[in-house]
Amino acid sequence: MNQLFFKNILIFSALAIGDIVFVNRLSLGTFIAPYIYHFFILQLPVRTSRYTVIMLGFLTGLFYDLIYNTGGAHAAAACFIAMLRIIVLPAFISVEDKDNNISPGIYTLGQGSFLFYAFILTLVHHIIFFNLEIFKISSIPLTLLKASLSSIFSVLLIYLLSLLFYRKKRK
Amino acid sequence: MQNLLKLLSKFGFVLLFILLEAVAFFLILRRSNYHLVVFTEGTSEITGNFFMLYSNTRDYFKLRAENELLAEENARLRAEVQYSKSRFYTTKAEGLNPIQAYKYIPCKVINNSTRYARNFFTIDAGKIHGIKPDMGVISPNGIAGVVRQVSNRFAVCISVLNTSFAVSVQLRKSKDYGSLEWDGVSPFYSTVKYIPTHVEIEPGDTLETSAYSSIFPEGIDVGVIESFTINPDDGYYIIKVRLTTHFTALRQVYAVDYLFRKEQDAIEDSIKNERQ
């Protein structure tokens, strides 16, 4: 329990530093604005209680709202994908995975399913966030394009980070 | 009753979800005071110090270009001294001497964004340097934003690249005025609305800040007309303007202190009731 707790604090801090210092400063044009912090919500262990997942989603978002001055847009988006995670995650894991309390990642879920899982949640997160940020109905087509392009980059970054920092577990 | 409790324990997390989403929306809707009052001082001080560290290490790599810009800026300011004094005069008995109306406080941008719909930047000067909310901020090339929140050593400013920013601008040629509002798309272009169509304009005309704003002095560069169309709904121009300030490389800026702000605000407030 304690080990899991510290591991997650470490992942949260590493993602915060990576997101604020590095990813947020990438200039990839007007339509590509990737984020990686929501990986924290994606990778929470599968047996984390539903209350905790939603609460952590909200608090993570709120933390980035305070840093990026975005009101509550990050909080709303992150809380929403926390809820979505509760709904979609059972489709990706087996009973055995649940017993082992795995953290969803490229090696635990398998590359294909993890990328699919990450892309769905990232896309929804970006669509909600960009729309709440600009808060204008007339720019929805534009934000949809921005969200799709950004999602591709975010998932790519998350994939690369997973390759770098996770090791394949021997069975 | 027992069934209700059972239901609650099973779907309580949905209620929690709805509650938290409501909180988030509440925070978005009161974005005009986007910092919670409690957090304002603390967070801007902490993030300010962090960005200060980051920008200090980055400074060295930009010194040369920065120096050139500074020299240019100094020259322009020297030429402008007369002009920034020219709006107010002492009594006639003293012989119509111009007195100083604007003071400039030099400061550096230590955090900046251009990729959001509502962009802000942080400057490294605050209360103790004389920065106050609603001061204009100009760069060597043109206007940059308006001070929003002030802590002791830092200030957060609304960038021109912010969809809720609007400022009164005028054509340098004819002095017809309109309103500069960003559409949230490109950091290089903005939009000017409400210039009537009987005014003759052409691409290449310069827009400057107007005399109607107590935030910026008159005549600061804003942008150059790129193209324009006529809005069929209200018959005003919609003008696409290339901004003169380079927001993707914003560094040296000056906060504008209008020394007669209090006096002007006081007399304008005194007739506010009559207007309604």
Image (cartoon, rainbow, N blue to C red):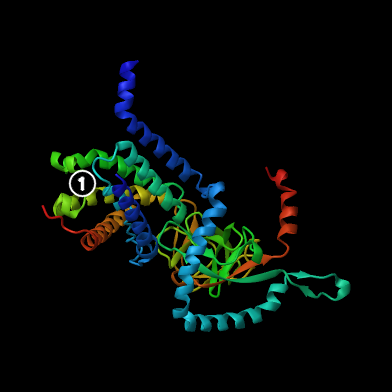
Residue A81 location (% of width, % of height): 30, 44
Hey, which residue is sitting farthest front in the picture?
Answer: A2
Front-most of residues B217 and A133: A133
Give the residue at the far left of this rendering: A171
Q: Quadrant of the C terminus of chain B?
A: top right
Residue behind mark 1: A102
Q: Secondary structure at mark 1?
A: loop
Q: Position of residue A73 (x, y in %)?
A: 41, 48
Which residue: 30% across, 37% down? A50
Q: In this rendering, does residue B260 appear at all?
A: yes
- Residue A153: % across, % down: 27, 60
Residue visible at 18% across and 40% down?
A98
**In front: A101, or A111?**
A101
Residue B29 vs B253, above or below: the answer is above
Compared with B12, A72 (above or below) is: below
Total numbered circles: 1
The residue at the point 43 percent across, 42 percent down is B24
Outermost residue toward the top in this view = B1
Q: Quadrant of the N terminus of chain B?
A: top left
Q: Is residue B147 left or right of residue A50?
A: right
Q: Which picture quadrant has residue A27?
A: bottom left
Q: List x then y, in percent, for residue B25.
A: 43, 41
Residue density around tag 1, few if under 14, some if 14–19, many if 20 or more, within 10 Å: some
